[in-house]
Image (cartoon, rainbow, N blue to C red):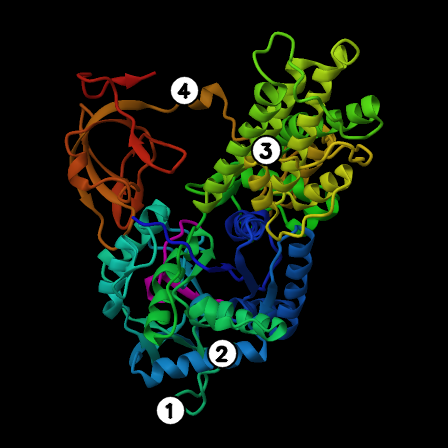
Amino acid sequence: MAVRLPKRYLVTSALPYANGPLHIGHLAGAYLSADVFVRFLRLMKKDVLFVCGSDEHGAAITLRAAKEGISPQEIVDKYHGMFEDTFKKMGISFDIYHRTTSELHHETSQDFFRTLEKKGQFTRQESMQYYDEKAQQFLADRYIKGTCPNCKYEGAYGDQCENCGTSLSPTDLINPKSTLTDETPVLRPTTHWYLPLEKHSEWLSKWLDEGIYKGKQMHDPKEWKNHVLGQCKSWIDGGLQPRAMTRDLDWGVDVPQELEGSLGKKLYVWLDAPIGYISATKQLAADTGKDWKKYWQDKDSAIVHFIGKDNIVFHSIIFPALLHAHGDYIMPDNVPANAFLNLEGQKISTSRNWAVWVHEYLEDLPGKEDVLRYVMIRNMPEQRDSEFTWRNFQEINDNELVGNLANFVNRVMVLTHKFYNGKVPKFEEEQDFAGSHGPLEDSFVEAELMDVFDMLFEMREKIYLYDFRGALQQMMNISTVGNQILQFNEPWKIVETDPHKVKAIMNCCIQIIAALSVAVRPFMPFTSDRMRTMLNLPPIEEKGELLKVLDRLAEGEYLVKPGHLIGQPEHLFSRIPDEVIQAQITKLKENDVTAPAADSKNGKAAPAAIDGSIQYEDFEKVSIVTGKILEAIKVEKTDKLLKLLVDIGTEQRTIVSGIAEHFEPSSLVGKDVLVVKNLAPRKLKGIESKGMLLTAEDADGKLGIVAPPAGWPLGSKVK
């Protein structure tokens, strides 16, 4: 497939919902990856706009306002300001950070709605919706809580269960209650505007599966993440249904008042919010004189949406369907959604206060913004859920940032001042190394710098493919090479006996640091600034500097010329004491609203296994046996579940397993498997599951069945 080279990029990050502060899961989901991508594009001299803003409408805002006894506007003003401050301090480099309560956004959203209405893209349907008789109002999704029909979690909302992630409708809930009055709501008829998604299935499938839109190749599906395409395919294969585009609310963007039946109706938040990307671009254009339409409507542009996996369907099906229905817009080039970041062995939960809040991190660990950025990118949940632990945070800081990058830079800077009074040494290119077989530039410096070029080139390729973890590793490999040069040659031991060799070594290391000062920029911008100061070089403006470095290395040119006076050395990073980490772990446990109460015998809380470890005696309780799958059937109205009949020797058991996105049912029949036999029975979608299969997951999120050796008797115990 021919590589598409867009003339310009429009990059968006999911609009954070303005009803609470940002936690590290938000950073890992939609913001750090986008910032790395955008900073990289700027360093490659690409035309790119990076837009975001606060999502300030919807039921959760009014619920929070009612809880705090203030107006919805006061709520969104509070958190919009917090978001702006947090993003700025974390180095998230938006070109504009807008908000959906702005007049421009309301106008843009209403104009978009009018266009779809005039084109006949909506249908009006009457449906039964929950109504709170005590509050005398219809209840939007978030105004209803009940028991999830899938996992039986009792705090599920009317649109989604935050425990298992299942998308819901209010009528799916068991024992629904109004969040306003705690009364049981009643169903009443109401009329809304609907987008008939089923009419969009055919072109959506072709666009997602083949990258073809309106007969033209627009993207390479192989560059999309498997879990994104898998979730979209599951939705389309399950049959798309009409989606209501309006709600009965008193806070949000009004349905255009000239339309009959618009009284009391607001735009659905998933119509309103993504249009926030458009209104933000419009505002940026008004501020800078750019033409916003080129970024949204020109086929030579690429739109990239960075989101978390809970927003995949909205950005890959619903919003594209809205853009298509409008008719003037191009489709997204990619939606590189990340999976979820877990915290100390558990899901991040705002309701439990089980989270690392970014604004608190900035207060507790000042000056360590880049440490958090680095750790988040290194552990980014690109293909599957990943984990943040404070001990791992400390380990990565101490071993990689201090032990590798900071150590290399500091040693080179100190030795350059010691040997040459801070001036970059000039080496004699014709001078041979002792025992070498060619000119100095060929045998050492040129070869080492070409290795750096190769690593920078590989970093570039990985970023273009949204592999930010891999790109980060390539960047750190450059520092590793620098350290190896120092360790292998030990210039401090031979500076008197072989000064020519030492000059070449130190010159080469300075060139590597100069390359690193640019390569570090997308990942750790504050560290890049400090490195440039130490090198006494101009700050990075993100105007094609990486492109220049690649060109100069390819041509064999200096990045820092001999004779250049460098600045004073400093330590880029420092080790984090154990007590600092322990304080964060203690804070996390103490803030957990579901933490166990104090033991009545000794007044102490039961210790929490925050590192996820278990005792040997606990593991001994698990009974694992061999089995064979006899039947495999997909569970109706689910994306992930398969109903399996498994023979474990002594009996045949029904097991419900969440592997439907990874295996065709027919491919599993006859497979030998390992089964957790003594797991307590659990009902999933009304089916009692008696056991669990063992699977393995690779770095790309692909599952494999863990199987016993061939020919083992069914029911054999695994020890």
Residue type at the position of mark 3: Gly
Q: Secondary structure at mark 4?
A: helix
Label 1: element kind: loop
Q: Locate the C terminus and report the quarter of the image it occupies.
A: top left
Within 10 Å of the Cα at label 2, are there few (<14), some (14-19), or many (20+) other Cα atoms? Answer: some
Give the SS element for disc 2: helix
Q: Is residue 24 above or below residue 603?
A: below
Q: Is residue 23 left or right of residue 669?
A: right
Label 1 belongs to which residue? 260
- Of marks 2 and 3, the one in the foreground: 3
**In this picture, which residue range is highlighted in magenta?**
163-181
The disc, 4 or 2, on the residue closer to the chain's N-terminal end is: 2
C-beta proximity under 8 Å, tags 3 and 1: no
Q: Which residue is mark 2?
A: 108
Mark whose residue sits in front, 4 or 2: 2
Q: CA distance from mark 4 to mark 2?
A: 61 Å
What's the residue at 41%, 20% (across, down)? 620
Circle 1 Cα neighbour tier, 10 Å, few/some/many (<14 / 14–19 / ≥20): few
Residue at mark 4: 620
Real-space CA distance between mark 3 and mark 4, rounded to the nearest whole angstrom = 62 Å
Which residue is labeled 3 in the image?
Answer: 556
Per the rendering, the mark at residue 120 is none
- Whichever of labels 2 and 1 marks the residue nearer the N terminus, that label is 2
Instruction: Tell me the kind of residue under disc 2.
Output: Thr
**Looking at the picture, does residue 690 appear above or below residue 331?**
above
Of 441 and 244, nearer the camera is: 441
